[in-house]
Amino acid sequence: MSTVIEAVPAPHMTGPRTAPVVKLMQAGDESRWDRFVLECPEATFFHRAGWKTVIERSFGHRTWFLYAEAEGRIEGVLCLAEIKSRLFGHSLSSLPFCVYGGIAALSDAARDALDRHAQNLAASLNVGHLEYRNQEPKHADWKSKELYVTFRKEILTDPEQNMLAIPKKQRAMVRKGIKAGLQCEIDDNVDRLFTAYATSVHRLGTPVFSKRYFQTLKDVFGDDCEIQTITNQGRIVASVLSFYFRDQVLPYYGGGMDEARAVAGNDFMYWELMRRACERGYKVFDFGRSKLGTGAFDFKKNWGFEPQALHYEYQLHRSTEMPDNNPLNPKFRLFVKMWQFLPMPVATALGPYIVKNLG
């Protein structure tokens, strides 16, 4: 049974409709929550109920998964998690470790009820800020910054059409991987993915997530979470963990070994993911979030994807400025350089204790 935590009147509504009631998701609510997420146009894979388990089990953060209900029907959802860190601050966010978030709703009344509750919750927790990771702007009076973009593109109905839609220079890299004889394999465990991912992020000088986190994603999301590994004569070249949602495929965590550059392993990997998604009837390739001015941004543009701005909005509470916990921040440059020189086993052991508080 769900816990009622707020009943909010909706004065702008007319007629006999009941005002939405905000409730906290409880065990047993997951199926109806996810049915709503599948049906709500604003909702994304990152609004799924399973993220509550992922965040609590992997990072130990406290969560509030709220929904607005009217006349027995869910009309909106909001996933929130609290991060409390001496180094990186105190926040309430929708949703840490996720590209998209914020409120997904079918009615203004549900949206308003969830929004008011989140703001009240942020105030009661005495956080530095409340963050919504929106795809569209929602609060003109909140702080925001132009840092992140996403890349989404239609998957055409024929694999060869998709190949020809890749700009010529990038297409040549894909063909290089094909000519090198690279193989694509689907893994049922996270071992090879973690090896490729940890190697890649260490090269970039950023902390690594724990292997347990990736295993939790696989356990929680099942067949909607797929691991594709590229090999060359049995050697790991690259690997990517992707999510499937509605008609979309979302490559989310990936990495390449040192050999990947020489044989165009990453190019071949994303092509294989696109080709397989095409053959399985998926319609949208969501290349995910990148920061402006980074190599990842350039790589995705080179594939013919156009950047679409993400609207991360911050309501400041105790804080006087927006958070800036990313590797592009000049104050982290020394840390990045230092991390690159750490022995790989040390970086892999220490990384999860840092990255859990970055969100």
Image (cartoon, grey):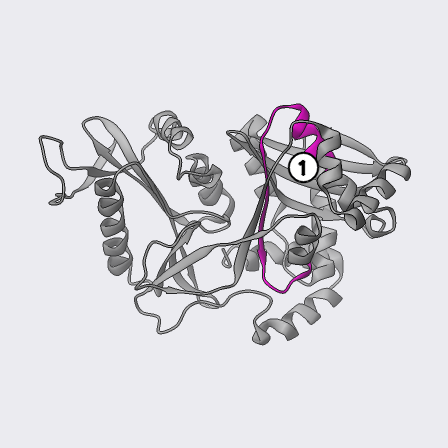
Q: Residue at x 79, y 44 (%)?
A: 171
Residue topped by disc 1: 190
Kindly indicate the quadrant of the structure image that contains residue 346: bottom right
Residue 185's spot in the image, x, y percent?
76, 30
On screen, residue 289 above or below 78 = below
Estimate the x, y position of residue 137 in percent, counting from the top left: 38, 54
Q: Quadrant of residue 335?
A: bottom right
Q: Residues within 10 Å of mark 1 (few under 14, many from 20)?
A: many
Residue 276, horizontal then vertical, whole percent:
69, 28
Q: Residue at x 59, y 75 (%)?
A: 330
User: In this orientation, which residue lies closer to the viewer: 352 or 98?
Assistant: 98
Decide if residue 252 is in sight here.
yes
Is 334 one of the magenta-colored residues? Answer: no
Q: What residue is at 72 percent from the left and 29 percent from the top?
A: 159
Q: Residue 126 appears at what percent x and percent y?
A: 29, 63
Q: Which segment is the magenta one?
A: 271-295
Q: Nearer the viewer, residue 287 or 15?
A: 15
Rendered image quadrant of residue 78: top left
Q: Amino acid at mark 1?
A: Val
> Is 263 displayed left or right of 60 in the figure?
right
